[in-house]
Image (tube, rainbow, N blue to C red):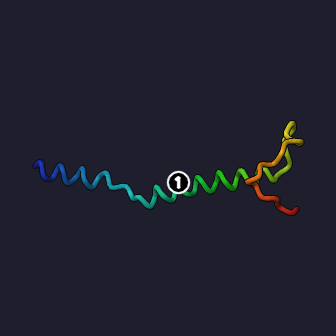
Amino acid sequence: MSTYTLLEVTDTATNFPVSAIAVIVVGFIAAVSLGSIAWYNSKRPPGWENKERPDIVPDLDK
């Protein structure tokens, strides 16, 4: 195996699609955001009934 072939193999081996990473990151942020909004708008767990809702969380009509 020549040096040129070795460099060519290592160059193509690290080419992970940037779009896949972007989809994973954006999906994680969306899941955490939507999950937080859903949790704050759900029935409060024991001990959290009288806590204030953060200003950033929108009110939803039931």
What residue lies at 81% left-to-right and 53% top-to-bottom? 41
Q: Nearer the viewer, residue 61 or 14?
A: 61
Residue type for callout 1: Val
- Name the image quarter holding residue 60: bottom right
Disc 1, SS:
helix
Residue 49 image offset from top left, x and y in percent: 88, 42
| Residue 43 locus on image (x, y percent) | 86, 49
Name the outermost residue toward the bottom: 61
Q: Is residue 1 among the parts visible in the rendering?
A: no
Q: Is residue 36 left or right of residue 17?
A: right
In the depicted structure, whether residue 44 falls above or below residue 58: above
Horizontally, residue 57 falls left or right of residue 14, namely: right
Q: Which residue is labeled 1 in the image?
A: 25
Q: Quadrant of the C terminus?
A: bottom right
Q: Residue at x 46, y 55 (%)?
A: 21
- Residue 4 drawn at (x, y percent): 13, 52
Q: Dot 1 surroundings within 10 Å: few (below 14), some, or many (20 or more)? A: few
Residue drawn at point x = 39 percent, y = 59 percent: 17
Residue 42: x %, y % from top left: 82, 51
